[in-house]
Image: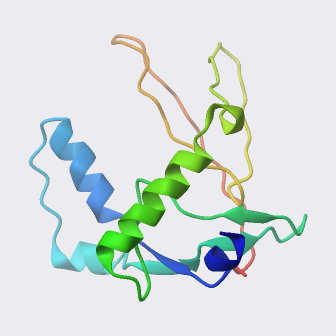
Amino acid sequence: MKERLSKLKAVHRFWDRYLRERKAAGSDVVVSDERRAGTPDVIHPIVRTHPFTGRKCIYVNEGFTIGIVGMPDEEAQSLLKYLYAHCTQPQFTYRHSWKVGDLVMWDNCATLHRATVDFRLPQRRLMQRTTLKGTEVR
C-alpha cells in the first residue's frame, strides 16, 4: 500500500463541502462562477514528507479530497474511503474537551482536524486562527 500511495496524487476541492454543509444547515447558498474561480481545485501528493521531521504522512481529507488523478472515480472513492477509515481509527484520534482559556495548536502538515459543533446557544465559540507560511508540498 505504501508503494502504491507514493505514486498517487489527489484532487482537492473547497466548494463541494462548503455547499453541502450550508445546505444541511438549511441555507440555499449559491456560489458564483467568479467566486469558484478564486479557489480552484488543487492537486497534492497523497503521501507527503513533513518538511522538518522527514516523516511521511497521508494527505487526504474526507471533506475536500474529491478524487485521484488518473484513476476511475469508483476505484478512487473506494481507496479514499479506505484511507479515511485508516486515518480516523481511535488510536489516531484526539478529541479536545474545551475549557475557558484553552489554547490548542496542531501541525497541519500531519493532522486531520475538524470543528465539532458540540455546544448550544447562547454559548458561543470564539476561535482565533494563526497560520504560518509553510513549505512546498513534496
* Image quadrant in which you'd find residue 11: bottom left
Compared to residue 106, the image places residue 33 above or below, namely below
Considering every residue shown, the one lying at the far bottom of the view is: 70
**Rendering coords of residue 4 (x, y %):** 63, 78
**Rendering coords of residue 97 (x, y %):** 63, 17
Q: Residue at x 73, y 29 (%)?
A: 103
Considering every residue shown, the one lying at the far front of the view is: 1
Considering every residue shown, the one lying at the far right of the view is: 53
Residue 13 visible? The answer is no
* Image quadrant in which you'd find residue 81: bottom left
In the rendered structure, the answer to whether residue 123 lies left or right of residue 72 reads: right
Q: Residue at x 52, y 46 (%)?
A: 85
The residue closer to the viewer here, 41 or 86, is 86
Q: Image quadrant for the N terminus? A: bottom right
Residue 67 visible? The answer is yes
Considering every residue shown, the one lying at the far left of the view is: 28
Compared to residue 22, the image places residue 9 above or below, namely below
Q: Image quadrant for the C terminus? A: bottom right
Compared to residue 103, the image places residue 49 above or below, namely below
Query: How many badges with numbers are in the image?
Result: 0
**Rendering coords of residue 24 (x, y %):** 19, 38
Q: Residue at x 62, y 26 (%)?
A: 95
| Image color mode | rainbow
The residue closer to the viewer here, 13 or 91, is 91
The residue closer to the viewer here, 33 or 4, is 4
**Rendering coords of residue 78 (x, y %):** 40, 62
Q: Residue at x 58, y 42 (%)?
A: 88
